[in-house]
Image: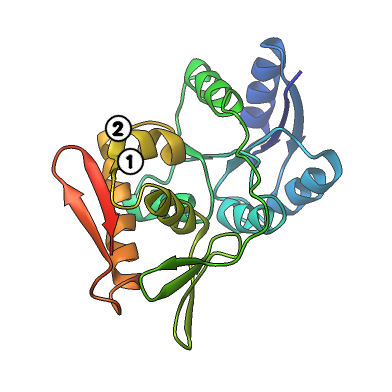
Amino acid sequence: MPNILLIEDEPSLGLIVKDSLESRGFAVQLAADGEAGLRLFRQQCPDMVVADVMMPKLDGFSLAEQIRRENAAVPILFLTARSQPADVVRGFELGGNDYLKKPFSMDELIVRIKAQLSRPPAAVPAPAGPLAIGRYQFDHPKQKLRFGAHEETLTNREAELLKRLYDQRNRVLERSVVLRDLWGDDSFFNGRSLDVFITRLRRCLKEDPQVQIVNVRGIGYKLIW
């Protein structure tokens, strides 16, 4: 039985979602604020976290940031009425896996939860040194990108995207594949978010002109050097 940690500060909505998920075969732990949710996360080690963004004591984004310091794999789905693109991008930057806007249907929430839980866990690579990208050194586990004495810390999603580009170096990384893998689906809105992340990675890699992330129109991106 999948164990879901639900963090929602609206008592009535929290209970409705909890009851609905339990009726579909999920075990649910409910917390009413971010601090309580973080305590439950550490105690219960849930299979997935479903969290509101605007909460007292510790907001959902700060909660996700803390969880990602401790666990890089557990899926995190945000529930929120905040729909500005910057909010959505920030949620993904901090390691969120999906984003569902309020009001939402329970059927859609359950489909999204099942989609996250059905993904195979990422393989844990054997310890290795930094990866060479031109004159850069990329430490994927630590999310660090170094050029000479300069070191930049990447977000979780930036590091995952750069790793996939590296693994496909000199070959095309298809947009649809990376969107389904890192964003959950290849919708237009998520595609715009991916474009923002590609622009940021290009900026991070600009010191070595031989390193380029090339657009392959209509298909995806290619990392070359």
Q: Secondary structure at mark 1?
A: helix
Instruction: Please give the name of the residue rendered at 51% of the width and 25% of the height, measured from the top-left corner.
Output: 112
Residue 225's place in the image compared with 214, above or below, is below
Q: Is residue 214 left or right of residue 109?
A: left
Secondary structure of the residue carrying tag 2 is: loop
Residue 187: mark: 2
Q: In the rendered structure, which amino acid carries the disc numbered 2?
A: Ser
- Which mark identifies residue 11? none
- Amino acid identity at mark 1: Asn
Whole-percent x, y for residue 163 in the image: 46, 53
Quadrant of the image for the N terminus?
top right
| Camera-nearest residue between 171 and 94 | 171
Count neighbours of disc 1 (C-alpha within 10 A) and say few if under 14, some if 14 to 19, many if 20 or more.
Answer: many
Percent x, y of residue 6? 68, 35
Among the 4 quarters of the image, the one containing residue 21: top right
Residue occupying the point 28% across, 51% down = 170
Q: Quadrant of residue 77?
A: top right
- For residue 190, the mark is 1
Q: Is residue 73 above or below residue 65?
A: above
Q: Are marks 2 and 1 in contact (CB under 8 Å)?
A: yes
Q: Is residue 198 left or right of residue 35?
A: left
| 191 to 154, vertically: above or below | above
Q: What is the residue that sits farthest to the right in this orientation?
A: 43
Which residue is nearer to you in this view: 20 or 94?
A: 94
- Residue 212 coordinates in the image, percent (x, y): 25, 64
Count of labels in the image: 2
